[in-house]
Image (cartoon, helix red, strand yellow):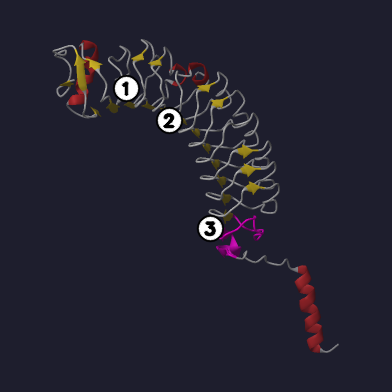
């Protein structure tokens, strides 16, 4: 064998032994060491592309994937971040994310998702951040989130969810931030929150809750921020925040139809710093309202009855912490002389 033939044989052998580096998919561009970032944004794709096995970030947003099929990402074992925003997705199949055991970030915002099959999130044991906002999801089936044992933040805002049932968050015991704003919720069943008692932030604003879900909320233990704005709730009952009162710092109850706090509504609340109560039908605050730690209090656009029970508000009219301007007294006339300067007649 001559020299050139020998070298050709050696190179052929090496080609068999060394793994072939997968190319960047057509219509995409890749960067980062070893093509770790694959960007296929608005590439006109209709099916999930093959990507290099070392890919860690895959951006597929603004494409056309009506159904995410089973095993579509199965060979992407090193993937950490997957972007599927604005991709016209309507259905997520069972096993759609099978094999993605290293995935931490999953973005599904701004699609048309109305069907999520049981087992859709299987294998996502490392998933920490899940964005499902701006879709058409009508409900969450029991056990759907069970594989997500490390889930920390869940965005479900701007969907069509009508009800939260017991077991809906089963398995997601590490969930800390839950966003359910702008849905169609009319109730939270008593056991709906029993699997996520460690929530720190809960947004339920812009729903159709007509009463405060005291039984469901009593399962929460360390809630720091609660947002209930834009719900037609008229009364906050006794002990509404007691189970997490030692942690509650921020409370949004503005733009409701709120008429009254029960006498012991704020029982156990000791560290509240921010409360938004504006644009309601309130005439009084309960005697045990937690003024002690308050830094920001917004109370405008309420028909206040300015007797001396509201006297603690005087400190909000002179120096920080301050209430927002627009405070008005409907009754009595004249108001209690202890009410702060600037609390104008209605």
Whichever of labels 1 and 2 marks the residue nearer the N terminus, that label is: 2
Count numbered badges in the picture.
3
Front residue (pair 54, 3): 54
Residue 28: x %, y % from top left: 57, 63
Q: Is residue 220 above or below residue 1?
A: above
Tag 1's secondary structure? loop
Tag 3's secondary structure? loop
Residue 280 circle label: 1
Residue 24: x %, y % from top left: 62, 65
Residue found at the very far right of the displayed protein = 1
Looking at the rendered image, the quarter that the C terminus falls into is: top left
Q: Along the horizontal axis of the image, is 17 left or right of 326?
A: right
Name which residue lies at 57% across and 46% down.
Answer: 106
Q: Kindly report the distance in space between the C-alpha atoms of the residues bearing marks 1 and 2.
A: 15 Å
Label 2 Cα crowd, 10 Å radius (few <14 / some 14-19 / many 20+) = many
Q: Are marks 2 and 3 in contact (CB under 8 Å)?
A: no
Residue 71: x %, y % from top left: 71, 49
Q: Which residues are magenta?
A: 27-56
Label 3 Cα crowd, 10 Å radius (few <14 / some 14-19 / many 20+) = many
Name which residue lies at 52% across and 44% down.
Answer: 109
Asked if residue 30 is among those painted magenta in the image, a careful observer would answer: yes
Asked if residue 202 is among those painted magenta in the image, a careful observer would answer: no
Residue 30: x %, y % from top left: 57, 64
Q: Is residue 314 above or below residue 86?
A: above
* Disc 2: which residue: 206
Looking at the rendered image, the quarter that the N terminus falls into is: bottom right
* Disc 3: which residue: 41
Tag 2's secondary structure? loop
């Amino acid at each position: 064998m001559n020299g050139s033939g020998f070298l050709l044989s050696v190179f052929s052998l090496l080609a068999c032994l060394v793994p072939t580096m997968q190319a960047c998919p057509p219509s995409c561009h890749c960067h980062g060491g070893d093509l770790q970032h694959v960007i296929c944004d608005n590439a006109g794709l209709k099916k999930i592309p093959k990507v290099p096995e070392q890919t860690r970030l895959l951006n597929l947003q603004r494409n056309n994937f009506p159904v995410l099929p089973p095993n579509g990402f199965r060979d992407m074992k090193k993937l950490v971040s997957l972007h599927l925003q604005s991709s016209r997705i309507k259905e997520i199949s069972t096993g759609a994310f099978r094999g993605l055991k290293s995935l931490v970030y999953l973005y599904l915002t701004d699609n048309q998702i109305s069907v999520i099959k049981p087992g859709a999130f299987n294998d996502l044991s490392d998933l920490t951040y899940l964005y499902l906002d701006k879709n058409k999801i009508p409900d969450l089936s029991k056990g759907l989130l069970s594989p997500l044992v490390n889930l920390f933040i869940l965005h479900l805002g701007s969907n069509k969810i009508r009800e939260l049932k017991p077991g809906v968050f089963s398995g997601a015991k590490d969930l800390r931030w839950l966003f359910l704003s702008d849905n169609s919720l009319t109730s939270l069943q008593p056991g709906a929150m029993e699997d996520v008692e460690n929530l720190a932030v809960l947004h339920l604003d812009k729903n159709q809750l007509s009463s405060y879900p005291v039984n469901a909320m009593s399962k929460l233990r360390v809630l720091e921020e609660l947002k209930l704005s834009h719900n037609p709730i008229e009364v906050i009952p006794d002990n509404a925040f007691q189970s997490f009162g030692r942690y509650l710092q921020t409370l949004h109850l503005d733009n409701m139809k709120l008429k009254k706090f029960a006498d012991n509504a704020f029982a156990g609340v000791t560290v509240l710093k921010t409360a938004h109560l504006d644009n309601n039908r309130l005439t009084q605050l309960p005697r045990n309202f937690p003024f002690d730690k308050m830094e920001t209090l917004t109370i405008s656009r309420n028909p206040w009855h300015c007797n001396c029970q509201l006297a603690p508000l005087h400190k909000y009219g002179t120096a920080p912490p301050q209430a927002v301007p627009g405070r008005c007294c409907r009754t009595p006339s004249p108001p209690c002389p202890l009410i702060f300067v600037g609390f104008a007649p209605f």
